[in-house]
Amino acid sequence: MSLEGQEDLKDFLDVTLDTFVKKYQQIRPGVLPIIGLDTDFTPPGETRDWIFAHDQLSLMIQGKNHDPFYVTAKESIDLVKRFKKPFCPQESLDLPGISHIPEIKHKNALTYYDTHLRNHVRKYVWRWIMARSQLIDIYQKSLRKNVPDQERYDPFGHNKFEDDALIIRKFWQQLKDYPNLDFKGNVQNAPGEIEMVLSSQNEAVVYISSLPGQEGIKYSSQEILISEVGLVDGKYIAEVWKLSAPGGLIERIEIELSESKTSLTLPDFTDDIALYISDK
C-alpha cells in the first residue's frame, strides 16, 4: 500500500470508528462498544501496528491468516505485551506444530485433523491458552462428498483429544481470576523445551512441554525452580496435572513462596504437564 493509501485508510477508519461509537451510544448511552478490526492479509509493519494501537479499537484481531502472515503463540504474547490489548486470531498455528491448511509447505507442519496426533493438538491448544488467546480454532469436516479422505471424520466416533479437552476445561474453570493473569514468572531447570507461566497476586499457572511437532517425548522426575511470579510470599497448594491422564489431576503438593521463588519436584511425564498454584 502506498503512503497516500495508508493515510486515506487511517482517515477512513478514524471517521468510521467515531461514527460507529456515537451511533452505538445513542442506543446504549454510557456504554462503550468493544471493537476490533481484522488485519487479514495485512503484513507486519506500520499499518498493522497503527490498527492495533488505535485507541478506539479494544482488541487485536488477526483474521483468516494465510502464509506468510500467520501469528504464532509466542508472537501473540509479544503483541499483547506491546499493545496491552487482548489478541484474537481467527486461525493460527505454532510451527512446526499445527497447521490447518493442507497446502502449506512448511517443513514438518502437522495437520490437526490427523486423529492420531492427539498430543500435538493438545499442546497447540495449551500453548494458545497460555498466550491468553481469546479464540482457538480447530476445524473438522464431516463425511460430505468431495472432502479429502485425510480430512474426513466420523461424527459418531471418538477422537482421544476429546478426553484432553475435558481436562483443559476442568483445569481452567477452577481459576479464580483469569482476567488478572499476566505474563509473569520463570521456570528454571525444567525438563521440557517449552516453559510458560501466567500469574497474578492470587494464583499461577505453569505449563511445560516438548517442542511443537514432537510427540511421545518422555521426561524423568526432576526438581524445578519457579521464580518472579506475581504471587505474594506465603504458603500455597500446587496441583500437578498430567494432561493426558484420566481426570488430569494427579497430586497436590504444599509449597512455600519466598522472595517470589519456590521449588518442587515434578513426576515423570510424557510431552506436557501443568501446575496450578493457589491458596486453596
Image (cartoon, rainbow, N blue to C red):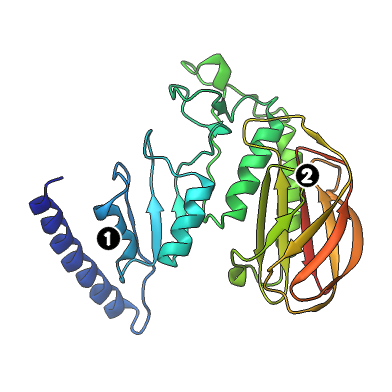
Q: Which residue is mark 1?
A: 50
Q: Quadrant of residue 224?
A: bottom right
Residue type, numbered disc 1 = Trp
Of tags 2 and 1, the one toward the viewer is 2
Whether residue 11 sits left or right of residue 185 in the image: it is left
Q: Residue at x 66, y 64 (%)?
A: 185
Tell me how far mark 2 sits from mark 1, CA to CA: 40 Å
Which label number is shown at residue 191? 2
Which x, y percent locates residue 4? 8, 53
Which x, y percent locates residue 75? 47, 49
Say if 277 sits above or below 129 in the image: below
Q: Residue at x 59, y 67 (%)?
A: 182
Query: Pointer 1: residues within 10 angstroms few (<14), some, or many (20+)?
Result: few
Residue type, numbered disc 2 = Pro
Q: Residue at x 56, y 15 (%)?
A: 149
Q: Quadrant of residue 84?
A: bottom left
